[in-house]
Amino acid sequence: MTELTDHDVRARLRAHQDGGPISRLFETGEIVEETFVALGMRADQCEAEGQAEEAEQVTDVVEYVSTVGERPPVPNWPTR
């Protein structure tokens, strides 16, 4: 995996917003314990639906979240 920028994370998650932790990461940069779980489930769902490329992109975000760790909303997240 290449190192993702904040912009890369938002681009990969745009189609995967869930109204929950994935959406909060997309909208504010917030990462909580549930974010990791939700992303893993979404990657599995993409894989099950035959969307291997989408699953890989979500898995890249899982790695980003694992590296960054939990954090509150990030100031100016949409413009970073």
Image (cartoon, rainbow, N blue to C red):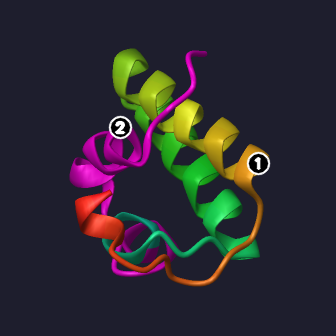
Crowding at label 2, few (<14), some or many (≥20) Cα neighbours within 10 Å? few
User: Quarter of the image holding residue 24?
Assistant: bottom left
Residue 65 % position (x, y): 66, 51
- Which residue is at the front of the view, 51 or 69? 69
What residue appears at the point 37 percent right and 31 percent down from the top-left corner? Answer: 49
Q: Is the magenta stretch mostly helix, strand or loop?
A: helix
What residue appears at the point 51 percent right and 82 percent down from the top-left corner? Answer: 73
User: Quarter of the image holding residue 63?
Assistant: top right
In the image: residue 48, left or right of residue 54: right
| 27, above or below 39, in the image | below
Residue 51 % position (x, y): 34, 23
Is residue 62 visible to the viewer in this orientation of the structure?
A: yes
| 40, above or below 63, in the image | below
In the image: residue 69, left or right of residue 53: right
Which residues lie in the magenta part?
1-24
Q: Which amino acid does label 2 sit on?
A: Asp
Q: What residue type is labelled 1?
A: Ser
The residue tagged 1 is 66
Dot 2 falls on a residue whose secondary structure is: helix
In the image: residue 38, left or right of residue 54: right
Dot 1 falls on a residue whose secondary structure is: helix
| 38, above or below 60, in the image | below
The residue tagged 2 is 8
